[in-house]
């Protein structure tokens, strides 16, 4: 839903008018999530998730020649490949690489069998280069190798693949992945290190720049003897991921709506005497029915999954719902009022709604996080509501907070990002004070369009009275 400044300001005026009254104009019936019946689950994508032209542009602007990744999230983003090894807690068995040349496909580096099990559909397979490894045919000699050329040329053992009996016709997926495995196996490397070094040599990177998302990759590069400059690849790829591809936008539209529906349906179990566990069970169940994985449900400032909490009449509490679909995150926050909220909390709830209505039409390319902080705090202060106010704009995608750190190879430091077209943004607005009859929250997901914002989830329920 596109938002115009006129329509938003009209809604803001109505909300402001109701701040001092015990009005329920912004309350919506809990039956609204029934629209979920028409929510179609997106199919397996035909294209890579990666926004390739944008990635090449960012890499060239930052003078990075090769991006080398070991983090499963980054591998998935570059190649659509989710590996079984990662799912069962065995990292370091797969890598991905991206060249700054627009003519080169992303590269997926893995064992043959891993790819055979995990291969995406044919249309995606054709858009990724494969580099396979097995184990050294002569381990003792291999362990003595000291230079890159010999490491790459070392003989590999045949590896293992399921036998093809040829007594019946293969399925299309079997046929396509076996064909790709056979082609890639013609250049089988003797180890993971050898396969990575081969990719570096193939890219002709002497005296150039490699970005790595894990410093353990530095050891492999140093063993190769290739003289290169190494920079922070996690920071780089998060900057790339800010601008979503069409496939990512499709996933974000779905998960934003599915996540909000799951949160609203979980709120339906709220009643006098219910506990936090019941709400979480319902959120997990509803998420699963949407083919989403629940990540957490914050209830009244409690995030631990097993945290106790009893629901009492007259108490209001925030819900902050996060689930993911195919790695992409929804983020949705509301206030649930058990009975009528007290006058002070009603003013807080209405003020949050008013502030959001004023901020929303301003969200467009070129606006900086600092501008959002300043406007939100100014508007809240003008309401004269006696409560602490927090505002946190953050990009959402493959992580709940999917944005680059301000510094290289460091703990996360939030920078003053400027909004860009096709970025998905949350403006998180909780009120966490104690002793005022509860907590409050308002949070939606917005796609930043060329000409303005698009709300990705149903925003009719500004607060929920049960």
Image (cartoon, rainbow, N blue to C red):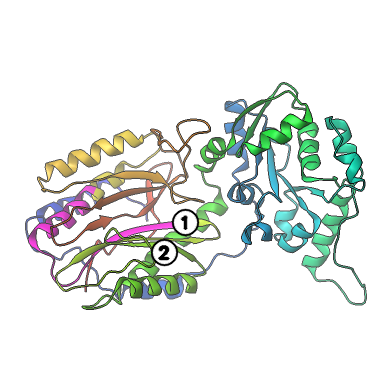
Mark number for residue 139? none
**From this viewpoint, which residue is outermost toward the top?**
207
Q: Where does the image place residue 75, in percent across and percent down from the top left?
A: 64, 48
Residue underneath mark 1:
329
Q: Where does the image place residue 370, in percent across and percent down from the top left?
A: 32, 34
Residue underneath mark 2:
259
Q: Is residue 341 magenta?
A: yes
Q: Earlier in the sequence, mark 1 or mark 2?
A: 2
Q: Where does the image place residue 231, in percent across and percent down from the top left?
A: 60, 29
Magenta part of the protein: which range? 329-355
Quick check: 319 above or below 7? below
Q: Is residue 459 magenta?
A: no
Q: Is residue 441 left or right of residue 155?
A: left
Confirm or deny contact between disc 1 and disc 2 (CB under 8 A). Answer: yes
Q: Quadrant of residue 138?
A: top right
Q: Residue at x 76, y 33 (%)?
A: 200
Q: Residues within 10 Å of mark 1 (few under 14, many from 20)?
A: many
């Amino acid at each position: 839903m596109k938002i115009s400044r006129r329509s938003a300001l009209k809604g803001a005026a109505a909300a402001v008018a109701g701040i001092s009254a015990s009005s329920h104009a912004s309350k919506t019936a809990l039956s609204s999530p029934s629209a979920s019946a028409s929510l179609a689950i997106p199919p397996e994508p035909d294209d890579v998730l990666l926004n390739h032209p944008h990635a090449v542009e960012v890499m060239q602007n930052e003078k990075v020649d090769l991006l080398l990744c070991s983090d499963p999230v980054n591998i998935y983003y570059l190649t659509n490949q989710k590996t079984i090894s990662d799912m069962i807690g065995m990292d370091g068995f797969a890598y991905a690489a991206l060249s700054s040349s627009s003519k080169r496909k992303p590269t997926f580096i893995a064992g043959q069998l891993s790819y055979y099990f995990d291969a995406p559909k044919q249309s995606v397979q054709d858009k990724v280069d494969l580099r396979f490894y097995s184990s050294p045919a002569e381990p003792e000699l291999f362990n003595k190798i000291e230079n890159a050329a010999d490491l790459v040329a070392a003989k590999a053992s045949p590896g293992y693949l399921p036998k093809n009996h040829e007594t019946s016709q293969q399925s299309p997926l079997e046929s396509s992945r076996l064909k790709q495995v056979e082609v890639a196996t013609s250049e089988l490397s003797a180890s993971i290190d050898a396969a990575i070094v081969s990719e570096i040599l193939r890219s002709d990177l002497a005296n150039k720049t490699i970005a790595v998302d894990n410093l353990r990759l530095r050891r492999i590069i140093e063993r190769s003897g290739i003289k290169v400059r190494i920079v922070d690849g996690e920071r780089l790829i998060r900057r790339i991921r800010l601008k979503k591809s069409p496939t990512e936008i499709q996933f974000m539209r779905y998960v934003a709506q599915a996540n909000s529906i799951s949160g609203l349906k979980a709120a339906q179990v709220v009643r006098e005497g219910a506990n936090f566990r019941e709400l979480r069970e319902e959120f997990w169940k509803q998420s699963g029915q949407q083919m989403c994985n629940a990540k957490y449900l914050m209830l009244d400032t409690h995030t631990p999954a097993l945290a106790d909490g009893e629901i009492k009449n007259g108490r209001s509490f925030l819900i902050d719902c996060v689930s993911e679909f195919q790695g992409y995150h929804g983020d949705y926050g509301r206030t649930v009022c058990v009975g009528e909220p007290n006058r002070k909390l009603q003013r807080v709830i209405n003020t949050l709604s008013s502030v959001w209505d004023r901020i929303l039409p301003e969200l467009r390319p070129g606006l900086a996080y600092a501008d959002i902080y300043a406007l939100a705090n100014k508007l809240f202060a003008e309401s004269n509501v006696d409560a602490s106010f927090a505002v946190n704009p953050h990009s959402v995608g493959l992580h709940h907070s999917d944005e680059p750190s301000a510094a290289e190879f460091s703990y996360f430091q939030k920078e003053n990002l400027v909004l860009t077209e096709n970025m998905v943004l949350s403006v998180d607005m909780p009120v966490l004070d104690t002793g005022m009859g509860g907590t409050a929250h308002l949070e939606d997901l917005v796609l930043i369009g060329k000409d303005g914002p698009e709300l990705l989830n149903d925003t009719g329920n500004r607060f929920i009275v049960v």
